[in-house]
Amino acid sequence: MRPAVRSLPWCAARVALLLLAVAAAPLAAQIEEESLDAPELATPTAPAVAPAAVPAQVMEAFLRAEEIFRSPDRPAAVPLLDRVVQQLAPRHEVGALSAAEVDLLAAALSYRAQILHQLGDAAAAEADLRALLAARPGWRLEADRVDGELFALYGDLRRQSVGELELELDPVAAEVLVDGVPVVTGEGPLPLLAGPRTLEVLHPGYAPQALMVEVAAGQSESLRVTLERVSAVIRLRTRPPGAEVLLDGELRGTTAADDQPGRDAALLPAGGADFSRTMVIDGVQPGLHLLEVRKAGFRPYRAELEIREAIDYPMPPIVLEAETGQVVLVDAPPEATLIVDGTVMRPENPGSSRPRLTLPPGEHRITVSAGRSRIFSTRFTLGDRQALEIPVRPQPGLAFLGVLGGDPQVARGLQQSLGVTLERADRWAVLDRAAEARAHFAALGIDAEALRRAASDGAGGPSTIDWPALQARLDRDFPALVHVFAVPTSDLVATTADLWVLPAAPGPARADRLRFSLGSPEELERVRAAFTSTLRLRTPWLGAVVADSAAAPHPVVIDVTPGGPAAAAGVSAGDLVVAAAGVPILAHAGLADRIRAAEAGETIPFGVQSASGTRALELTLGSSPSILGRDTGGMLPALAYTELVLLGERPDAERWLIELNAAVILIANGQWEDAVRLLREVDAPEAPHGVGRATVDYWLGVALSALGPSLRSAAQEALGRAAAVPGARLEHADGAFVAPRAQARLRALVSR
Amino acid sequence: MWQEAERLVAGGDLDRALDSYRLLVQQFRDDALAPDALLEVARLERLRDDPAAARATVAQLTERYPRSPAAAEGFWLAADLAAESATSFAALDEARTTFRRVPLLYGRDAYPVLPARVAARVRSAELGILLEDFAGAQADLLAAIEEEPATEWTPRARLLLARTYLPSAEWVAAAEILQQVVDDGEDPAAAEARRLLSLIHRRVVRPRGGSAWGAVARFPPSGLALREPTGVAADRDGEVLVLDDKDHVVAYLAEDGSVVARRTLEGAGRPGFTLEGEPYVLREGAAELLFGGTRATLAEPGRGGPLKSPYAAVRTAGGTWLVAAKGFRSVLAYEAVSGRVRDDLLADRRPEPEDLAIDDYGRIYVLDREGRQVLRLGPDGRFLGIAARGEWRKPVAVAVDSLGYVYVLDRGASRVEIFDPAGQRSAAIGPEVGGAVELRDPVDLAVDGAGRVFVADRKLPFLVLFE
């Protein structure tokens, strides 16, 4: 707020508007549709001098002085007023002040004169009043605010040095400069310092006129000035402002933002918002002209103007049309959310499987999201008026939250290389959320150091990160199937970093991490591979327990599962396995490798040896459900869990097997309640010799046991059911037996 | 300072390392590393054979930094020290209780990953097995395997779980787990698992296929000629101790028969291995641990003075020596430290103990010459039942393997008989054993961890090895 300034005369000048007659519209096809009938309001002819024209320091000193002037301690304002006068007076003498500065100088002199008068320095006060009149002859003191004696003195001085000029102008809005300084006209006679004065009269489209006048002190003179029309004038406004205006290829200026928007809103399209101030193109001669308005990001406006005579041509408002292209998303899920460059957009044809968006030209990233596992994200470059079809191939969402900590240069490089690596993992829609993620980590008090401490939890530290809170927050703000971020292991010199992977709820509410060396392509490849692995929930089934023995050169068959593939092929307990799939077998590991490499249902040649000799058999491998459990086949459990979620979405999914696997991962993470909820829903088949209902019962019993005494009887029931199936297995039909474990847990429950 | 201490430990300068850690604790009492430093102090004190100081340091650690992971480790260390120095089953049980406090005090909710907790569960299970609490041991082990992230203790936990299946003859379930331990890696647990699998193959699977015995061989294959072998013992790792009565030589042989060490010892009696694998021989008034070991004094009950004719002895997990001696119709139990007779086992049954054996679970086997039976006792000496019974002419030696199979040598019939854990005779061999060898005057037998059976025959210049 600058109340003192508002009282200055030039402020009043700024609202003195002059109505111009509407001139004939130029002939231009593009603008004929616009409202040509709207009367045009012209800008004030007197240049509106903004307060900014006064140097800030001077204005500040003046305002401070004015404040003191209004206090009881007026004399204290003198040093500040001295500074204002010293700054402005020398420039005034050479005619280098703006109108605003002249007004400021006059006000400062007025204040100082009053103070000096009050202090009894009559001579100095009079000197200031004289200087004031020289600067602004029309300046008036207010009788009720100024000492009567001083007021009288000022009146005397004014009568001795100022005369008046009654000006009649044609056109009336013409601008007048006295001795090079703009003055306000139209408010009665123009006060002038007695003596010879240079008068300049200007107006767009007219030839300027300069004349010498001399008004005697205390006298009033009349003068009529008629300017000669010499050219046409074009007046225009643009939306948006900031457009370059060229006439016949010559740049004539740039439209400026309107500092009084809404002033003539009713006269402009769409309420006048965002239009520029009127720009005047002066000196246009009759004839054909090419008007061009251009601004980056907008289609250029061109109009051919036929200027017939030297009059004012107010152009209809020029609305620049933004450059756009169109994107059609082919096969997008109808319920999908469309996010363009981080902003949610509604398609122009909602509900369509080919949603359409109009976008400005340039590079964009579009994300099509229909649930956390059906996200599509791509970058594209769109040209003006281009129609681009983008096929949508939804993928599971991976929110990359960037790099926390580390040397800034290392962090930048790592962020970039990880971003590229994760995108190369191919099967994920990578959503770059690095910029926004920092605030979320900070809000939860999670920083690089805390994560490094969490990484050393392997050494037994209490949990330092509130993973469930982080998971909930990320799920809410960055919906994706998995959230990934990296932390270099040192902020100074890091040679390794941890890649943290946190799945979405209801997945394990604790991140797993993968440590990798920095600066090695092989290591990045390892990271990529971690995100590309796939799970096998059914693997080949041999149907025999085979073990190494120091008493034999080949592994020995300890037991054969009744009705299993080995039994069907004629393998017996006690046989030695000498060959499988054409490869000699010397240890169990070799046999396991051959079976792992085969497919369920595949028939492989099998060589066995017993007391009666060696036999060649054809063994058709069966298929067994696999429970990953703690051993997720080298995958991070967090990623294994997301894999299960994805597998569950396939139409041929064995739901019970996926749910059982997911529950076991939750148990490994200590999420007993989540596991119980899931296991109670699992509809597993009965399996007397393998993984099935009894396996589910066992894990249910384990999870219930962990939840406290109140669930003990439920745990006992579940474990009892599991213990009653002697052939049931824990992880695989060739794996550990359920029954002995269930019995042991039952005994432990009973003895508690 | 921490790094300096670590460097000193790596360089073997434990004293200065200890000083460094102590200084660190004194000067930076509130530093994050202080609990770890205190733990290191306790560890080094233990390494320097100062368990009392280590215990005091652990007490300081758990009192000063009770919520630190180092304190959990401290509890573990205290329990381990207690187990190490236990000389009774009550003391073992107490140590086990301390191990069991670790999971209670440092639960998964607050400490999702805590290796000390896993280690405590496993050690608790180990002691549980020695204390015959298989159910409790299995509960500890299943928690360690199924409810904890995998650690270096996991293979050992699996191995122990498989071992808890053996007394109830759940061979297939045990074999499946053991093979998993073998597949997991080449650590000591894997070697032990391989050994047990070999045993299951030899004792369980092969007899079912009709071929109880593989080859018969001379042992050692070469390099050591025996004149009159009268005693033999074997440990779980396949090492063999043989007594040649003629030359008064005790030879310590590696698994392949090569001589590791030999010692001339007048008046040496039956050799043996403790559960921890220490070789010993019996002498008048003592069980003498060989090759750098100490001797355990055995006093004559009542009268005092050295026990005259001890002819069989085993040392229990609690450190008690159990001895069969001429003239006593019971098993004498000697206190671990004082060497005084603490108890008379089986005094009410009045057996004629001819030989003793101890299995991996600490159970004692007493060969009762007169009763023609083998009595099975719990680790605490409680009578459990008859492990084997036969029409033996002159039973002189008993052995037991890791599966609980009992081996009896009948000198009168020159025969070895094998009984399964349920007491059923599963195999017999002798006097002709194949390989052009005939047992003529067998006097002792032993079985190693992989099920190889060794027989000492006075009239054969080698041990007979049944593969």
Image (spheres, coloured by chain):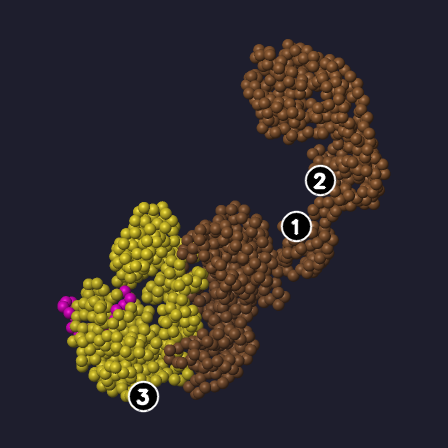
Q: Determine the chain carrying the residue at label 2.
A: A
Q: Which residue is mark 3?
A: B435
Answer whether residue A679 is visible to the viewer in this image. Answer: no
Q: Which residue is mark 2?
A: A254
Cα gap from disc 2 to disc 3, whole angstroms:
113 Å
Q: Quadrant of the C terminus of chain A?
A: bottom left
Cα gap from disc 2 to disc 1, whole angstroms:
34 Å
Residue B156 horizontal/vertical position (percent): 38, 66
Question: Which residue lies at the image location 46% right of the left edge and 83% below the top edge?
Answer: A608
Residue at the extreme bottom = B436
Which circle, 2 or 1, is nearer the viewer? 2
Q: Which residue is mark 1?
A: A344
- Tell me if B334 is positioned left or right of A747 in this view: left
Q: Are marks 2 and 3 on the same chain?
A: no
Q: Which chain is brown?
A: A
Residue A725 horizontal/vertical position (percent): 49, 70
Q: Is residue B304 magenta?
A: yes
Q: Quadrant of the N terminus of chain A?
A: top right
Q: Amino acid under label 3?
A: Gly
For the record, the magenta segment spans B301-318
Tell me the SS state at disc 1: strand
Q: Tell me what hue chain B is rendered in.
A: yellow
Which circle, 2 or 3, is nearer the viewer? 2
Q: Nearer the viewer, residue B10 or A181?
A: A181
